[in-house]
Amino acid sequence: MRLFAVTVLVAGTLSTIPVQAEDLLAGADIGYGEYLSGECVTCHSQDGADKGIPSITGLDPETFATVMHAYKVGDIEHPVMKMVTSRLDAEQIASLAVFFASLPAAE
């Protein structure tokens, strides 16, 4: 169900995101993503537990990156995520995407 909701959300935002699909994961580095993940796991549990805040582990990296760019440009409105993503560049988003994709998905 979670993947379906994310997919529907992403499908609605794809047309307005300025980043091309083939560029979403450009420069991705899993180690850099792990390094950057500290702020993310403050709210999003790294073990995949969903306690009112969506799990981001095991997500398809393109989906993760697309959603992050949508927060960054304001296509998805959320004040905390807007603040977090405003400080990230495309390489950092890509690196976070491949890192969180490497973790087991929430059950």
Image (cartoon, helix red, strand yellow):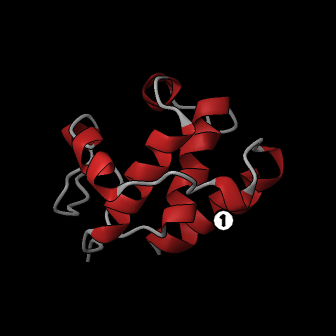
Question: In the picture, residue 18 is in which quadrant?
Answer: top right
Q: Position of residue 45 (x, y in %)?
A: 20, 52
| Residue annotated with mark 1 | 8
Q: Position of residue 48 (x, y in %)?
A: 23, 63
Which residue is painted at 70% across and 37% down in the image?
75
* Residue 5 visible, this orientation: yes
Q: Position of residue 49 (x, y in %)?
A: 20, 61
Question: In the picture, residue 46 is in which quadrant?
Answer: bottom left
Residue farthest to the left, as pictured? 47
Looking at the image, residue 73 lies above or below residue 106: above
Which residue is painted at 36% across and 54% down in the image?
54
Looking at the image, residue 46 lies above or below residue 72: below
Q: Give 31 or 40, whichever is nearer the viewer.
A: 31
User: How many tags in the picture?
Assistant: 1
Looking at the image, residue 87 lies above or below residue 100: above
Q: Position of residue 62 (x, y in %)?
A: 57, 63
Which residue is painted at 43% across and 56% down in the image?
97
Q: Amino acid under label 1?
A: Val
